[in-house]
Amino acid sequence: MGIAYQNLRISFSPYFPPAEFAPASGCKLTAKLQFPIMISSNCRSKDFESSRYRVRNFSLMLQYMVPENDGNGDEKFKSFGNWIRGSRLLFTGGSSSWWNLDEHKKVEIGAVKPVTVYLALSRMWKLVWDSNRWVLLVAFGALAMAAIAEISMPNILAESIFSASRGKTVVFARKIQLLVILSFTSGICSGLRSGCFGVANIILVKHLRELLYSAILFQDISFFDKEAVGNLTSRLGADCQQLAHVIGNNINLITRNALQAAGALANLLTLSWPLAISTLVICSVLSAIFLLYSRYVMRTAKLTREFAACADEVARESFTLLKTIKIYGTERKEVGRYNQWLDKLAFINTRESVAYGLWNMSFSTLYRSTQVFAVVLGGISILGGQTSAEQLTKYVLYCEWLIYATWRITDNLSSLLYSIAASETVFQLMDLLPSEQFLSKGVKLQELTGHIQFVNVSFHYHQRDMLLEHINITIRTNEVVALVGPSGCGKSTLVNLLLRLYEPTNGQIFIDGTPLRELDIRWLREKIGYVGQEPNLLHMDIKSNIRYGCPVDTTQEDIELAAKQACAHEFISSFPNGYDTIVDDNLLSGGQKQRIAIARAILRNPAILIFDEATSALDSESEHYVKDAISALKDNQCGQKTVIVIAHRLSTIVAADKIFVMDRGQVIETGNHEELLCKDGYYARLVKVHNNVFTSVCSEQLD
């Protein structure tokens, strides 16, 4: 391998690093590196016995090697690989692939419908126009006056200079007065324009975020199963902010420079139309180059926002699970995951910067060429007696103004296209229709008693096997029912179907004899109280957390009564601020959070109350309080309620009126605690296992 490397290095010395980067022997195969070279005639295949190679598009694919005891690879090989990757820019084949972005299109956008520039601009304009049209009218009025004042100044400036050189004092004084008036007019109107467009920016971002947040929030729960939270928050934050510059900066400057360019062109045509046409040709070349550049920028913009959203999702997930990361010592692994997306961002941004450099180089070259071209043609015209020195001065000034305005138009147009392309997903999300549950107006029963029937219900999640099969369950009014079974058997899924977070694949669910699909979902959820395994409390005071989502007006006495029924009043009162205490993760224990969540469910005075693994993460004392709260409901202290309990701990469900035992998506046993023990089936085995474990623990503690 060393001989082969030396032969390649000798043959292609300008493109190879020094000899100390040569691969060492006694190593194992690792990553592939691409070399932008051809195999030299003095390289024999037997020299490559330790590595695989192939020639494709004049590139040699080699598997390089690192010492076996070094999992990260030798630093020299890393430098060698970086040097090789950089050298590919020198070659035509490598250069074209360097600009290629197709291989990085790995993130799918949620919506399929493409968003055009016209559609995006019209929607943003409508958002601001409908909110405060006078802001836009004043902004564009001030813009027009400032542009007219500015474009008039070169002509008057040239006339004032040449009137002074000719000794025309009165004309010179009059021109100076006019220049002063135009300067103040331009300054005042420019300030007014900037202020109004700034207000338009604020209005636009506010309405964009409001509409986007509403569109996301009213989607089905299945939408959030597929979309990462970090991606959605990135759309609400960075992507909407990216669009803030479209009207306030891009449209503003494009319109202003377009008016100035039109004025400059009109003056050029008045002075000399042949010279004006030559300037237009250069502007046309500049615009053609911009079209190529803008297409590339739009592609980089989409990828930049997608990769930034993915990086935000990794960061959000890491910060959320920070305790787990610390415990398992995976900080470096998480940094590596985050860096993967940063590398992709750097890949795209590097190419975008190089493309901008090429575009800027093209403009600077053409801009300076225009100046020289104007002086040469103007000088020839003066020598031929066709143009005066004053006309040439005006021509040069307006020529520079036209080319500069063209550059500003294309530069701001590039920024506009970048913003719209980067935020395409924002409009696609805004176009999503709300869930049918929120659009349809279903039936509202006069009174909900809580009689529930599952009739031949089957269900499976998207692209997964059937989770529930032919479920037939009847739950009577004011009955405490327990669902028991191993993890993954479908207990929580059954509750999700009852809450209509998902729709059954087959079968029907009836509540008080009415199909669930026909009921008004918002009205129904007002009649259901839910307590999950992990109580989700908001960062607000305890009183607001208990009152959260309550459909009726409540007093402090109602809140305290619900807290007492949930066995939460005592510990809440022990806080210095009582019910006004702000909820903090470090302030409350798991059991305390759970009891606040139960109080929130009780305050709604629901006809159906669901406890989904509400005691699985609690200690014995906290579980005792929760069981007391459930017993209070069963003893009719809080009115008629149908209670559904999902639990692994058998001590929580012993007192249930009916127990449904589930396994592999089916109900395999039904009855109360004593009846199921007599059947000596699956439930009886669970009880025996539970009792054996309890006995073993007690014995160990006595020993």
Image (cartoon, helix red, strand yellow):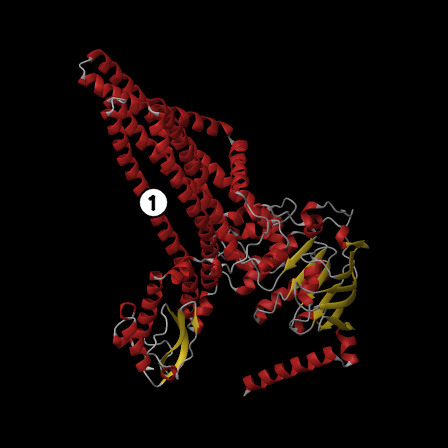
Viewport quadrant of the C terminus:
bottom right
187 or 4, which lies in front? 4
Q: Above or below — where is 689 with respect to 634?
A: below
Q: Above or below — where is 526 with respect to 288?
A: below
Tell me if residue 539 can be seen: no
Q: Above or below — where is 29 with respect to 595?
A: below
Query: Residue 277 sits in which quadrant?
Result: top left
Residue at position x 42%, y 31% from top?
Answer: 196
Viewport quadrant of the N terminus:
bottom left
Tell how many labels: 1
| Residue reaching furthest to the top | 170
Q: Position of residue 613 (x, y in %)?
A: 63, 67
- The local secondary structure at tag 1 comes to helix
484 or 97, which lies in front? 97
Residue at position x 31%, y 21% from top?
Answer: 182
Residue at position x 60%, y 60% from top?
Answer: 567
Q: Position of residue 71 (x, y in %)?
A: 38, 78
Q: Position of residue 158 (x, y in %)?
A: 25, 22
Tell me if residue 179 can be seen: yes
| Residue reaching furthest to the right | 513
| Residue reaching furthest to the bottom | 703
Q: Is residue 482 left or right of residue 591?
A: right
600 or 432, which lies in front? 432
Check disc 1 and give the amino acid type: Ser
According to the picture, the residue beneath numbered tag 1 turns out to be 362
Mark 1 residue crowding within 10 angstroms, few (<14) / some (14–19) / many (20+): some
442 or 160, which lies in front? 160
Q: Position of residue 699 (x, y in %)?
A: 58, 86
